[in-house]
Amino acid sequence: MGNPFSIGPIHAGETVVDLGCGAGADLCVAVLLVGEMRRVFGIDLTDEMVDKARSNIELMGLANVKVESGDFVNLPLGENDVDVVISNGAINLSPKQSCVFRELLRVLKPNGRLYLADMLRLDTSTYATCKSNDGVDSWANCVVGTLSRECLEKLMADEGFRDVSFIKTTGYHTSAETEGALFRATKPGN
């Protein structure tokens, strides 16, 4: 969908989660950025992708990386445990996006950052018709969970993120109605 690393810095020693890590391409980049004192976690919904990510990590000789199959609304991480969450084309696939953003706030440290590359719906559907947790009809109306820019910004803000910022579209299309986009958001500090 886009490059989550172009959104903001990831510093040596930070704890990073790649939500929807797939085969592990972004996960491997995150591992290299945080250095030896790293804690990097990859979470994916499918065992097959977890196996691919683990294989790719092994091929690259990377250590201190944990990859698990898991539900995006119940992450196997502690509260206030993560500096940065990256996600590339995964959250729009969840039928419970509000719950996903709430869970990300739980695991992020105060002032923790979300670097999101995901699909946007290009029309101007209202937030009320775009809620991804209102049932099958609204879910289908949003091109299988892809929200408009305004809907996605409002959803993140409503769930508690601050400084929700649309960065840009990426030019990547999965349909005539969708385009990849980059967002940044922050968990409020103490």
Image (cartoon, rainbow, N blue to C red):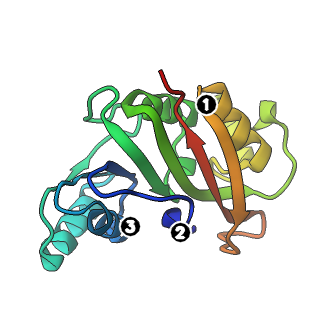
Q: Is residue 113 visible?
A: yes
Kind of residue at disc 1: Asn
> Which comes sooner in the sequence, label 3 or label 2?
2
Please name the residue that numbered disc 1 is placed on.
133
| Residue 36 percent across, percent down from the top left | 16, 61
Q: Which residue is mark 3?
A: 26
Residue at the (46%, 30%) spot, across then down: 105
**Which of the 4 quarters of the picture holds residue 118?**
bottom right
Q: Amino acid at mark 2?
A: Asn
Helix, strand or loop status at disc 3: helix
Neighbourhood count class around disc 1 (C-alpha, 10 Å): few under 14, some 14–19, many 20 upward: some
Q: Considering only order in the chain, which callout, 1 or 3, is on the residue closer to the N terminus? A: 3
Residue pushed farthest bottom?
Answer: 59
Pinpoint residue 124: horizontal percent, then vertical percent: 87, 48
* Disc 2 to disc 1, C-alpha distance: 27 Å
Q: Do the residues under discs 3 and 1 have CB atoms within 8 angstroms?
A: no
Residue 163's spot in the image, x, y percent?
66, 38
Label 1 sits on a secondary structure element that is loop
Within 10 angstroms of label 2, few (less than 14), some, or many (20 or more) residues? some
Disc 3, disc 2: CB below 8 Å? no
Circle 3 Cα neighbour tier, 10 Å, few/some/many (<14 / 14–19 / ≥20): many
Q: Amino acid at mark 3?
A: Asp
Q: Is residue 128 above or below residue 34?
A: above
Q: Which quadrant of the structure image shows residue 11?
A: bottom left
**Which one is in front in this view, the residue at disc 2 or the one at disc 1?**
2
> What residue do we see at 71% from left, 69% from top?
175
Q: Which mark is residue 3?
A: 2
Residue at the extreme top of the image, as rendered: 190
The Cα atoms of the two marked residues, 3 and 2, are separated by 9 Å
On the picture, is 48 further left or further right than 106?
left
